[in-house]
Amino acid sequence: MRLLLNVFVLVLVTGLLVSCDNHQKEVKQLKDEVIGIHDEVMPLMGKLKEEQSRLMTSSGKMLLDDSVANGAIAEEMNEVAKGLEDAYEGMFVWMRQYKVDFEGMTNEQVIEYLQEQKEKVTKVNDDITTALEEAKSY
C-alpha cells in the first residue's frame, strides 16, 4: 500500500513538473513571436515618417502649381500621409501598453495575454506595411 502511494505521488509530481515546463516553453515561444513581429517592422518607423513628409511636400507643391487640377490627387496623398501617421502612432500605442512583467498572472493568463498581444502587434505590422505600400503608388 505504501509503495502504491509513493508511486502515485511520484507520478503526480512528475506530471506537474512536465506541465509547468510545457507552459514555460509555450510562454517563451509566444513572447519570441510577439517580439519578432515587432522587430520586423520597427526598423520601418523612420520610413513611415520619410514617406509622410514626402507625400505632404508633394501634395503641397501640386496645390501651389494648380489647386483646381491637382486638388483631388493632393487630397488622396494627404489621406495616405494620414494613414502613415496612424500606422506610426499605432506602433507606439501598442508598445506603451505591452507588459513585460507577468507577476501575479497564472500561466494560462500569460498565454492568453501573449496571444492577444500577438494579434495586436500583427495588426500594427499589417497597418505599417499597408501604409507603406499605399505610399509607393504616389
Image (cartoon, helix red, strand yellow):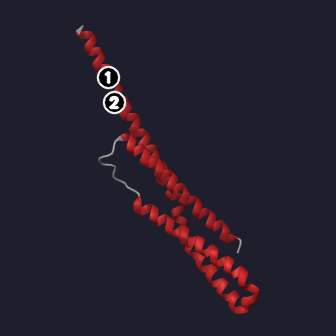
In the picture, which quadrant includes the C terminus? bottom right
The residue at the point 36 percent across, 34 percent down is 20
- Above or below 4: residue 13: below
Across the whole image, how many numbered discs are drawn on residues?
A: 2
Residue extending farthest top: 1
Q: Position of residue 107 (x, y in %)?
A: 37, 40
Q: Is residue 24 shown left or right of residue 61?
A: left
Q: Which amino acid does label 1 sit on?
A: Leu
- The image quarter containing residue 41 is bottom right
What numbered label is drawn on residue 12?
A: 1
Q: What element carries label 1?
A: helix
Is tag 1's residue or tag 2's residue first in the polypeptide sequence? 1
Q: Which mark is residue 117?
A: none
Q: In this view, does 85 lie to the left or right of 8?
A: right
Q: In this view, does 73 lie to the left or right of 42?
A: right
Q: Which residue is drawn at 77% across and 87% down?
A: 69
Which residue corresponds to mark 2? 17
| Image quadrant assignment for residue 70 | bottom right
Residue 85 in the image: state x and y as whole percent. Answer: 55, 72
Find numbered disc 2 in the image and state the secondary structure of the residue it sits on. Answer: helix
- Give neighbour class at mark 2: few <14, some 14-19, many 20+ (Cα, 10 Å): few
Percent x, y for residue 83? Answer: 59, 70
